[in-house]
Image: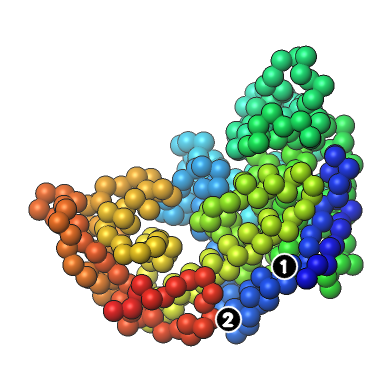
Amino acid sequence: MSNIIETNLKLQNGYNVHVNDGYLDTYKNDILTFLDDLDEFKTIDFAKNIMMGQEIKANNTIEGIVDDLSIIDEVIKTKELSSEDRKRIINLYHGYEYILKNRSINRESIADLYELLSDGLLDEYNLEHTSRYHREAPVYIKRNSVMGGCPYTDNMSKYYYDPMFDFDKNAFYGIDVNDIDEYMKSLVDYINDDSDKNSINSFIKSQIAHFYFVYIHPYMDVNGRTSRTIAMWYLLNKEEYPYIIFNEAIAFNKGYEENIMKSRDRGDLTLFLKYMMISVQKELEKQYLINNISNNYGNYMNKELKQIIQYMISMKGTITISDITSFYNNYNTKKSPIKLYEEMIKPLLDDNVLVKERDTNKHISGDMKNAFININSDLIDVNEKKFKYLKLDKFKR
C-alpha cells in the first residue's frame, strides 16, 4: 500500500524528505502489538535506566568508541576524566540530564545541547570554524570521519556542493554554510509542528529529525551524537519511552550508515525508517527476555551480568565461552576468555542462570577447556507468540 507523506524538509538537490507511510504500517503495527501489555517499558524510569547506561554506551559505540558499563558508571559517579573517551561519556551524561529537564526544542536549546555534547572534544581547527549555531566552513564526512574542507583539488571545488557529484559512495558533504540557518529553522519548525500526528507516529518523526540533522551537518564535528540525542529528546517530550532504546538498536544491527546514505539521494526515508523500526523491535524483544530471566532468577543481577545475557541472546547458533569473548570484545575493553569467564560467566553458571552443556576439544587457558553454554531455559517464561525477530528455540533443552 502506498501512502506518500511529504514533509517541508527540503534537500539541496530539490527533493523533499518523504515517507511511504503505508509501506511502514506493518512494522508500526508489529511494535505496537508487541508493546501492547508491556507497561514496564512505558515509564520514565525505564527511559532513565536505559539512557544512563546502555544508551550512553551505544551512542558512542555507533561512532567506534567502546566503553565498559562499569567505566560509564564510574565516570558518572566520580566525574574523573583521564581520557577523551571518558569526556565523551560525561558529555552525553550532561546532555541527557539537559534533555530530561528541558522540554523546549528550539535553536537556542539545540545550541546549548551541542555545547554540552562537544565540550572539550573539538580540535583547534574545528573550534576556529564553529560559532554557537553552526560551522563556518565546509565539511566532508566519510564514515564518521570528519575532514574540514574539500579533500580534492581546487579545480574540482565547483562540484563541492553538487549532491549529484559523488566522489565516494561512502561519503557526503554537509550542506552549504550559507543555508544552514534556513534548514535548521525548517527542522525546528518540523519538530514543533504536531499537525501530522495522525499520520506519522512520534518514533518515525523522531528519526526523520535524526536523519535531517545529519543531512544538514550544522557543525564541524559531534553531529551524529547530537542528532541522536535530539531524537531522544523529542521522544521524551512525547513520553514515547520504549523507543529510547534506538541507539542500542543501531549499535547491534548493521545497516545504519548505508540506509542514511541511500536516503540522501532523493529524500525517501522509507527504508531507513523500516531499518530503525525492525532494529528497535529486536532490542525491545531482547530487553523483555532479559527482564523475564532477571525476574525469574529472583536475586540481584548487575548491569555487566545482564550484558552477558544480552550478548548471548544477540548471538546466533550454539555458543561457547570463546564465542562470547569475541562478541564481548567487539563492544568493550578487550578481555581474555579466561578473565571474562572468571569475572562474568562463572558467576552466572554458579547461580544456574547459565548452564554448561559440554566441553569442546579446545582450551581457553591451561587446563581450562572451552565449553558450550546456554541460558537456563527454566528461567524463561514468556509468550513466544509475542516475538517476531528473536528465536527462542536455541535456549530450549
Q: Amino acid at mark 2?
A: Leu
Where residue 161 sits, quadrant-wise, is top right
| 215 to the left or right of 299 | right
**Residue visible at 85% across and 39% down?**
12
Where 15 falls versus 286 (above or below)?
above
State the quadrant of the N terminus: bottom right
Residues tagged 1 and 2 counted as in contact (Cβ below 8 A): no
Where residue 355 sits, quadrant-wise, is bottom left
* Residue 314 location (% of width, % of height): 43, 63
Front-lying residue, 116 or 25: 25
* Residue 324 location (% of width, % of height): 33, 57
Which labelled disc corresponds to residue 38?
A: 2
Which labelled disc corresponds to residue 24?
A: 1
| 25 to the left or right of 35 | right
**Residue visible at 31% across and 64% down?**
318
For numbered disc 1, what is the local secondary structure? Answer: helix
**Label 1 packing within 10 angstroms: few (<14), some (14-19), many (20+):** many
State the quadrant of the C terminus: bottom left
Q: CA distance from mark 1 to mark 2?
A: 22 Å
**Residue visible at 41% across and 84% down?**
381
Q: Amino acid at mark 1?
A: Leu
